[in-house]
Image (cartoon, helix red, strand yellow):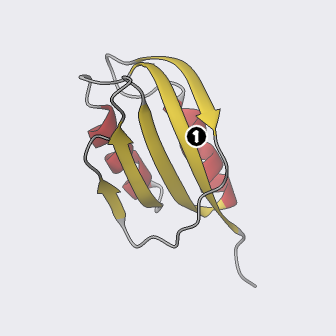
């Protein structure tokens, strides 16, 4: 039996740049065994896609609401599920 998977696309708002949010996201996603990506947006928010077992993706999204030390997250918005598939987890350039 295979484990159901999900690819979630999220946007995190608040004080999330300049506090190591991308590095924290990378480390946390890898610890949870997720694939995907994370990047800063020019409007000051962070955007990410997380792919893996449904429960682990839910854990990652919940953790995004706190983020790393020094972050203040005002909102985690789930956008449409993303396409994928992804191999590994990468930190992307700001767009």
Q: Which residue is denoted by mark 1 in the rendering?
A: 61
Q: In the rendered image, which quarter contains the C terminus? A: top left
* Quarter location, residue 67: top left
Q: Quadrant of the N terminus?
A: bottom right
Residue sitting nearer the eye, 53 or 16: 16
* Position in image of residue 47 (x %, y %): 45, 40
The image position of residue 52, as x and y in percent, is 57, 64
Which x, y percent locates residue 70?
Answer: 31, 16
Residue placed furthest toward the right = 1
Direction from residue 33 to residue 81 in the image, left or right: right
Say which residue appears at 26% left-offset and 30% top-offset. Answer: 20
Rendering quarter of residue 24: top left
* Position in image of residue 25 (x %, y %): 38, 42
39 vs 16: above or below? below
Q: Residue furthest bottom?
A: 1
| Figure check: 8 above or below 40 | below
Please report the residue visible at 30 percent of the width from the left and 24 percent of the height from the top: 17
Residue 2 is left or right of residue 25, and the answer is: right
Q: Residue at x 44, y 59 (%)?
A: 36
Between 83 and 2, the one lying in front of the other is: 83
Residue at (66% x, 55% y) in the render: 81
């Amino acid at each position: 039996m295979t484990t159901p998977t999900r690819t979630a696309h999220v946007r995190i708002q608040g004080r999330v740049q300049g506090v190591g949010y991308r590095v924290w996201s990378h480390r946390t996603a890898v610890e949870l065994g997720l694939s995907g990506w994370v990047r800063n947006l020019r409007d000051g928010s962070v955007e990410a896609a997380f792919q893996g077992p449904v429960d682990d993706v839910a854990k990652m999204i919940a953790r995004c609401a706190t983020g790393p030390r020094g972050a203040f997250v005002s909102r985690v918005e789930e956008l449409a599920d993303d396409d994928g598939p992804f191999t590994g987890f990468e930190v992307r350039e700001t767009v």
